[in-house]
Image (cartoon, rainbow, N blue to C red):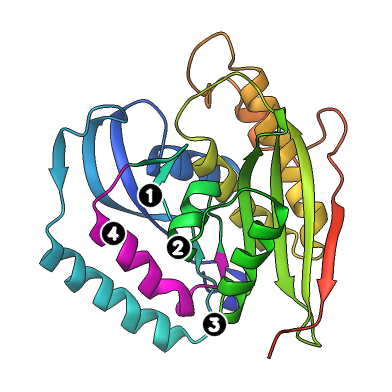
Amino acid sequence: MNPSANREHIISIQSHVLDGFCGNNIASFVLRRRGHAPKIFNTVQYYSKYKHLGVEMKQEEMKIILGALKEDLAAAGDYLWICDPVMGDNGKLYVDKDVVLAYKECIPFVDIMTPNQFELELLCDRKIKNESDVITCVRFLLNRGVKLIVVTSVQYLFDKDHLYLYVAYQNSQGELVAYKYKIFRFDFDVCGSGDLFAALLLSFLIRHRGNVLLIVSKVLNIVHNVIKNSLSSGELDIIENQDIIASDGLCGSFIKAEPVCATHPTT
């Protein structure tokens, strides 16, 4: 994203499915509905989000296109890279192990990462059993160059009714600062909620800037309401909830951030 000349240039590099909402099917709609004009680059084109049947871009083709994009970004100078490391969830890996290695190689170049609990474990080679493990993992990523970590969902054995989202960054003194949000957990296992969150986060960061904790609260509010309104259908009702998606997150109360830690960097 290059905000120069008062015009953002957004490139969304994700998968595409013919049936259902996930990947670029969500990102393209959400960003356009919120007034952006993203350029869409599909890495794969599958029939369904549940059946990986379709066309996959060859590795060499991907390298050529990403190489050209890398040159454009270097020329632009000012850009923001939000990486949602889509690899799996709930202990299940969706992709080849080579993809995990590729995401690890990207870490030093990424500005913002939005992994879920399982993806954070893969990136850091560490199982997450408690909050201390989360802090250890986000510290590892921040020390490798990521500027902002948003862990989109962590579930603990002691609390089956809630998920926990963590926001972590380093302040100007190099101290790790972390906050958490306690989120009601719907009994709704469906693809696409992480894609929805990432697209909304990008839109809010571009248009509103400012306090990232308030931005995350607004994004959570929208995602919460979309999921709540989709419970009876079995998948995310993106079209039916487009007015909520286009809003600034004003449906009901916001989930407030709770401080976790602000610690000095380790040497």
Residue wearing tag 4: 99
Instruction: Name the quadrant containing residue 60.
Output: bottom left
Is label 4 in a helix, a strand or a loop?
Answer: helix
Sequence-first tag of 2 and 4: 4
Sequence-first tag of 3 and 2: 3
Cα–Cα gap, marks 3 and 2: 31 Å
In front: mark 4 or mark 3? 4
Q: What secondary structure predominates along the stretch shown in magenta?
A: helix
- Is 222 above or below relative to 81? above
Circle 2 residues within 10 Å: few <14, some 14–19, many ≥20: few
Q: Is residue 25 left or right of residue 183?
A: left
Residue wearing tag 3: 78
- Is 267 above or below relative to 125? below
Residue wearing tag 1: 87
Tell which of 26 and 142 is nearer to you.
Answer: 142
Residue type beneath disc 3: Asp
Is label 2 in a helix, a strand or a loop?
Answer: loop
Q: Are marks 1 and 4 in contact (CB under 8 Å)?
A: yes
Circle 3 residues within 10 Å: few <14, some 14–19, many ≥20: few
Residue 247, horizontal then vertical, whole percent = 72, 37
In front: mark 1 or mark 3? 1
Is label 1 in a helix, a strand or a loop?
Answer: loop
Cα–Cα gap, marks 4 and 3: 27 Å
**Span of residues in magenta:** 94-112
Residue 234, horizontal then vertical, whole percent = 48, 14
Sequence-first tag of 1 and 2: 1
